Image (spheres, coloured by chain):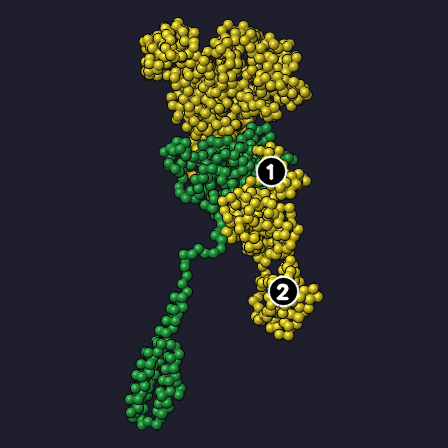
Chain colours: A yellow, B green
Amino acid sequence: MKFSYNWIREFVPTLHEAPGPLERLITMKTAECEGVEPVGELLSGACVARVESVEPIANSHNARAVVDAGLHGFKTVVCGAPNCRPGMLTAWAPIGKKVINGVESDGMLASPAELGINKDHSGIIELKAGAPGDPLPRCAPDAVIEIDNKSITHRPDLWGHFGVAREVAAILGLKLRDAVDLSLIPSAPPAIGIQIEDFSLCPRYSALVFENVSIGPSPYWLQARLTAIGLNPINNIVDMTNFVMAELAQPMHAFDADLLNGGTIFIRPARFGEAFRALNDQNYTLDASNLVIADAAGPIALGGVIGGAHSAIGAKTTRVVLESANFQASSIRKTSAAIKLRTDASIRFEKAQDPANTVRGLARAVELLREISPGIRIVGGLADQKKEMPAPPPIALRHDWLERKLGRSISPGEVRRILESLEFRFDEPQARVYSVSVPSWRSTKDVSIPDDLVEEVGRMVGYDSITPVAPLVPAAVPPANPTRKFQHEVRAVFVDQGFTEVYNYSFLSEESVRAFGFDPAAHLRVSNPIASDQALMRASLLPGIWKNVTENAKHREAFRLFEIGLEIHKTASGLPDEISHLVAALYERHGDGAAGLYELKRAAECLMPGAEARPAAARPFEHPARSGELVWRGQAAGRIFEFHPSLVESGRAAILDLDLRQVESLSALRTKYAPIRRYPSSAFDLSVVCPLREHAGNLQTAIASLSGPLLESIQFVRQYSGPPLDEGQKSVSFRVTLGSPERTLSSEEAGDIRTRIIEGMRSLGYELRL
Amino acid sequence: MLDQSIQELESRSLARIASATTLEELEAVRVDSLGRKGPLAQAGKEMGKLPPEDRARIGKLLNSARQNLEQALEAKKRGLDSGSLNARLEAEWLDVTLPAPGPRRGHLHPITRIQRELEDLFASLGFAVLDGPEVETEYYNFDALNIPADHPARDMQDTFWLDGGNLLRTHTSPVQVRGMERLGPPLRMIAPGRVFRNESVDASHEHTFYQLEGMMIDRDVSVAHLLYFMKTLLAAIFHRDVTVRLRPGYFPFVEPGFELDIQCLICGGSGCPVCKQSGWVELLPCGLVNPNVLRMSGIDPGEWNGFAFGLGLTRLVMMRYAIDDIRYLQGGDLRFLEQF
């Protein structure tokens, strides 16, 4: 929201702080400002000038004009404006001399846009009155302070200049002049009826009727104000409503009274399917959740959001009904969100405006209309319907509590001064216990508990006046987070093994999900995705890692990377299941991929010592002959595989996908200590001849189960294929170590076990090379 | 006569030791001179036959000859040993400038690095590190934080909604609520994690980024305590003393609420492009926990109160490493990631 410095100064006449320092003060004490911009700089030194003569310049669109600039004297100016003609009154601005089209031009004649009055750049400004040399009436260079909208979400009063002026006066200890003279509202019976169906949706609706209205442009000073803060001047009546809104934060709407049906305005929920054509020329179909302002024939405005096209002010309007109402914040927000239309009015109403402000807005309107629509007359008196709104009870504020919260001492007089400067009413029924009444414009949503008053006092006394203090709290060891610790350990393992950590997005496209053979319908879906290809929540980290592999393979011949992240799985109800996974990839452009897969398996074993890979049916994205399930401590923990060659254009990528929740729970198993064996063990090697595609793991399991209780360990030694073995055969060698904690095994015992294994393996159909 | 032959044997053997070139030759000298059947041993055995007046003198002579020979043999043996060792060592030359085989160490993601640093830092100050789900309910993400439905503050955070009515957490603040519910007061906790906002991605905006939420609940926690913690933490984060300031900021879950600025670390406060000439950089929102939030989490605000803050972890990472494009962080490009 933009604020005009000159406008603020109207209510704080003794303000001498320059715009820059003022902006910083507002930031420190009230709300975040985003900068100061000068506007209407050309108005500095600009004056009324009468065009005396205009002569064409050869070979140019421009003309040579001589103007009477009063005390500045006669000036020769090169001007290209089509409306530049002798006798007209316009504005001359001293910007120095410059030769244009061979003519020395002294200063310039300015368009309204150049002067910052409105957007009109079609010609130089036309003034109706004034003597050459006079300054432009009530138009002066200004500075615009922009306040971050987010930082005044809670402050309905700061959506108007008067509210900001009140803050400025409080910050600087200056006097605030009220913007409103309530005595301007005549006391007479109202000229229009008002009927509010639901006072909770519309706590107050006030209106005045005017006649003998003339429609035309607003005076330049008013246009300049609106232009400075980013509003477009339209006509005097509409501009006036915008002006009051920008000043008092009270949105208003003007209806053409002659286009209304009947003498009563109804404020009611829309009927289902009711049609409404708004000022923006859009048609809306309404339902009961939308509050409408209606006449006997139907909706004339969408309450608090936008007026209707039918009853809009036009060039022929002579009678006006001026609405100044108050609406329930959440209802306005809902309607505005539902029809996707946020207006200056709805943005204000959804901050919970002060119902007391409706009549103040009308009073200010009367004052302005007398000036900008000469001859205007009020018909009847104020029409005003409202629900009784008892003032909220005062807040009890204990002085010592306030000091404890702030962490500094403050004198009671200072507390009182601050709160009163912000127009809180301050009483002290007991010593150092205050009773603080909240002004109506702060009590709609903003201030209701003592903590809110801590903020008022704190910000005004200045947070920079608080000295940091170490809290006196017991030292305590915080509760542990074993999962996080475990994941950091996993990271350390994989980084040590040469893997680099990546972070991928939680969103996936349907296409990538399908490419992996997953069912998009099984995924949790984002209702309002940023893009259609980011609509599904990842139920696997694999598509992300696949993308990393594909992208990095463009620059690298070999690399290792991993990610730890959450798989998000849809559940029947409640929150989804979020399972932490690790996916690691080992990519090599050259080679047959076998070494990569085994290297990745080794890395996995660094995390899960003794984990085994068991042959498993390949999923669609896995190399059908290179995939396995990883089993650790008897439980499935994940998979290891090579990406299907159709997914990897050149080279091969070995992939590890671990369920970290599972791995973590298996890691938690305590190692049980066993004494170091005192008796020597005995070992022998066995070579099993088997078909080439026999899994060594199966042989090992078979040997282990044949070995009996004296088996200490069994280890793969090597495998071999080639002569003298038959084609299609290989020999796999294991070292079997036997031992007992109680004694040294005799060579007969060891020999018996060896024989048992050999015979057992033979009976399973394997030949042994001895 | 005996005296002479001992001396001759000694000098002859010493000469042979000196000229020996192999351990074998040396061994031969040892056997010849000091061996059990050698002349010295022989002479020793015959000592008894000597006249008593000669025994002491000859004995001395024999001992001295034996000692001299033993020393000479030992010295020579050492010489020969180290010679052959040297030859072996010389033959075993390695090019130490060759790179070591095997993979190089990988790299932690920069966010992980800073996050760990902060976790350790807070843990050392007695803060628990808590986690919460990335998919949250409306209640935990908004209502329990004093942001009821249709509150305009909901517009401050563009939310990703999920089919079924849940949402992607827009901040790590819901973990505050879960922490209060689970652990109760007194409480010191942080919650680093991934958050989501529905905004378009460019060099400085991301729909997915990381925050670190912090909270302390105890008795009589004040703005002065908040300031103390923030100053302490920021000094540790930036490895230098930082000047901070609080100014009003609006967040429904705190009251009063602040924006905490630090004096620009680039220009020291004199104004530069990084701080947009203001001398200050907005760093984190914080405040005293709104009593409504405490109450909703089952904590009596009459007895307990606290402060909360939210640190933009992603932003901090970018500041720390001077990263000028946020998209790198989730781009998965090793050329970027391997720099950390």
Q: Looking at the image, which is closer to me, A39 or A168?
A: A39
Mark 2 belongs to chain: A
**Figure quadrant of the N terminus of chain B:** bottom left
Question: Which label was assigned to residue A509?
Answer: 1
- Label 2 secondary element: loop
User: Is tag 2's residue or tag 1's residue first in the polypeptide sequence?
Assistant: 1
- Label 1 secondary element: loop
Where does the image place residue B71, in percent across and percent down from the top left? 34, 78
Q: Quadrant of residue A573?
A: top right
Q: Looking at the image, which is closer to me, B164 or A556?
A: A556
Instruction: Please say if A402 is above or below A331.
Output: below
Residue at horizontal 55 percent and vertical 34 percent from the top: B197
Where does the image place residue A540, in percent across and percent down from the top left? 60, 44
Residue A457 visible, this orientation = no
Q: Residues within 10 Å of mark 2 (few under 14, many from 20)?
A: some
Instruction: Please say if B281 is above or below A378.
Output: below
Residue at horizontal 39 percent and vertical 77 percent from the top: B23
Residue A539 visible, this orientation = yes
Residue indicated by mark 2:
A725
Where does the image place residue B288, in percent across and percent down from the top left? 50, 36
Where does the image place residue A103, in percent across and percent down from the top left? 33, 13
Residue at horizontal 64 percent and vertical 42 percent from the top: A518
Q: Amino acid at mark 2?
A: Leu
